[in-house]
Amino acid sequence: MNSNETVSIDKIIENLIYLHPLLSKSLTRSIKMKTNLNPGSLFILGLLSKYDVLSMSEIGCKLSIPKPHVTAQVDKLIAEGMVERLLDPNDRRIVNIRFTEKGKEDFKAIKQEISKDMRERIEKLDENRLTQLYESTQQVREILSEIMVDSHTTMTSCTKI
């Protein structure tokens, strides 16, 4: 790798590091205005909306967070009536988590409110900037998905226990 490639990779890394707090701040502000749940709880709900039922270990693996943090977030969601614990019929050591009906409805409403807030911000862009934002985010999404597939911490490496 020559120095131009190193500089280019370093700039990519710098941009990616810069993007995270921008996205996080924007989403966190929207979330705090719409719900008392924190982003970690919403990430868990997002996973459950995709996978329906997951074990505590699978949630931790897919979100790359330690199991004790998953437990704390799940406890909050249970207190809100949004999820429930289910014992695995085949292995009593495994605790599965799934949405309640209230959780599904509340999560849908929260997502709509957050989307509405983001839409209001994005709609202020002119057509050219909208196209640029769409193409850029689509490319970043595709590229990050591609490089994460090669990583040992990928979402696909989390399997049912």
Image (cartoon, rainbow, N blue to C red):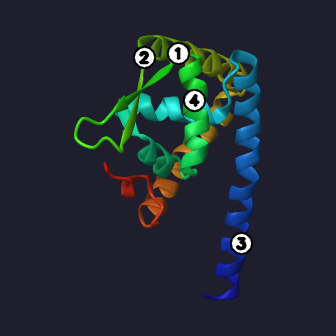
Structural distance between the alpha carbons of marks 1 and 2: 7 Å
Q: Nearer the viewer, residue 142 or 80?
A: 80
From what the image shows, is residue 41 above or below residue 147?
Answer: above
> Does label 1 or label 4 sit earlier along the sequence?
4
The residue where tag 4 is placed is: 75
Q: CA distance from mark 1 to mark 3?
A: 45 Å
Query: CA–CA distance between discs 3 and 4?
Result: 40 Å
For mark 1, give the secondary structure: loop
Vertical order, 123 against 109 (above or below): below
Per the model, the C-alpha gap separating discs 1 and 4 is 10 Å
- Mark 1, Cα crowd under 10 Å, few <14 / some 14-19 / many 20+, is some
Q: Who comes first in sequence, dot 2 or dot 3?
A: 3
Residue furthest to the bottom: 2
Residue 136 is at least partly visible in this image: no
Circle 3/circle 4 CB separation < 8 Å: no
**Disc number at residue 81?**
1
Residue 7 visible in this rendered orientation of the protein:
yes
